[in-house]
Amino acid sequence: MRASRLLTILTTLQLRGRVTAQALAEQLEVSKRTIYRDVDELSAAGVPIYADRGPSGGFALLEGFRTELTGLTAEESDALLLAGIPAAAADLGLAGAASAARVKLLASMAPQARDGANRVADRFHLDPVDWYLRPRPPEHLRTVARCVWENRQLEILYESWSRTARSLIDPLGLVLKAGRWYLVAARGKRELIYRLDKVLDAVPAERSFTRPANFDLAAAWRANVERFEADLRRATARLHVAPSALDRLYRLGDAIADPIRAADPDDRGRREAIVPIESIGHAAGLLLGFANEIEVIDPPALREEIVRRAAAVIALYRAAPPA
């Protein structure tokens, strides 16, 4: 670990020039005192590092010195593709490794190529979490990730919508979608998706498993998502939509919003569309947020459910507020 940290300090100084002890400590997630000890160790080994004091000071290498020691550790190699996704790297416990891998990779590049890579990093940032939400890594994410890396079977206690049960699974891959982590896994001959925040317990098994040679995580994820959405939305509803609702249709999801946008407006700008719905209760919850801007024409059960919920809201707010 110390050797990897010393190499990261060396390549960081080679790449960036003068760097403060505080910046190095934050990058490597250690104390400033540890950085000072590491710099002393590098100096004792013959690396020409000098320090400038003062507000604009820091550590730097003697001009002209360059090392070719830019080898990646196994953990840094695993983290390399996450170097541009800091939220995912942090959730997986690989933030330090991803940062070190990026530094070593840049240090190994020719100056012109390095400038191009830095330009991308300076001009593109990925924030995978939706608005008004804070990232909360699932409790067992790192345990699950370790089993994915090691091809190790995993015993989980999972809370689905219908029951809570234990299962022994082969964890095949992790997916971060809209700030939420999912696991694609095999259970027997079935391929399933698990929401990691619904995993109540995760215990690595002693046995490993053989990963399917032709498994494609991206393709498997797309196929499972398409099947899941198709299974959910088997019913339909006919809606009248006012033009004032169009700029907020994204709240309903594309399966509902797209048919509405594609419908021809009448002389008042209202649109009529038949859209897929998951259930009467789920659709009522979505559509109530649009008040009188979206009217359900069919099915009658959905109209009745919206009337029932609206009446409950009216009764609540007509009553005197609690003291």
Image (cartoon, rainbow, N blue to C red):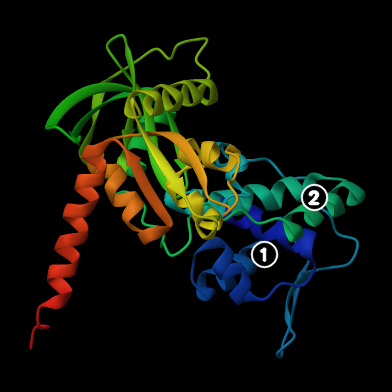
The residue at 66%/60% (across/down) is 9
User: 198 left or right of 43?
Assistant: left
Q: Please, what is the three-letter code of the amino acid marked with disc 1? A: Ala
User: 111 left or right of 35?
Assistant: right
Q: Nearer the viewer, residue 287 or 158?
A: 287
The residue at 27%/22% (across/down) is 169
Q: Position of residue 257 (x, y in %)?
A: 50, 42
Would you place residue 91 above or below residue 41 in this image? above
Where is the C terminus found, in terms of image quarters?
bottom left
Question: Would you call the spot at circle 1 few (<14 residues within 10 Å), some (14-19), or many (20 or more)?
Answer: few
Tag 1 or tag 2, which sits nearer the N-term? 1
Residue 117's disc number: 2
Question: Would you call the spot at circle 2 few (<14 residues within 10 Å), some (14-19), or many (20 or more)?
Answer: some
- The reply to whether the C-beta atoms of the residues labelled 2 and 1 are less than 8 Å apart is no
Q: Nearer the viewer, residue 208 or 234?
A: 234
Residue 44's disc number: 1
Is residue 290 at least partly visible in the picture? no
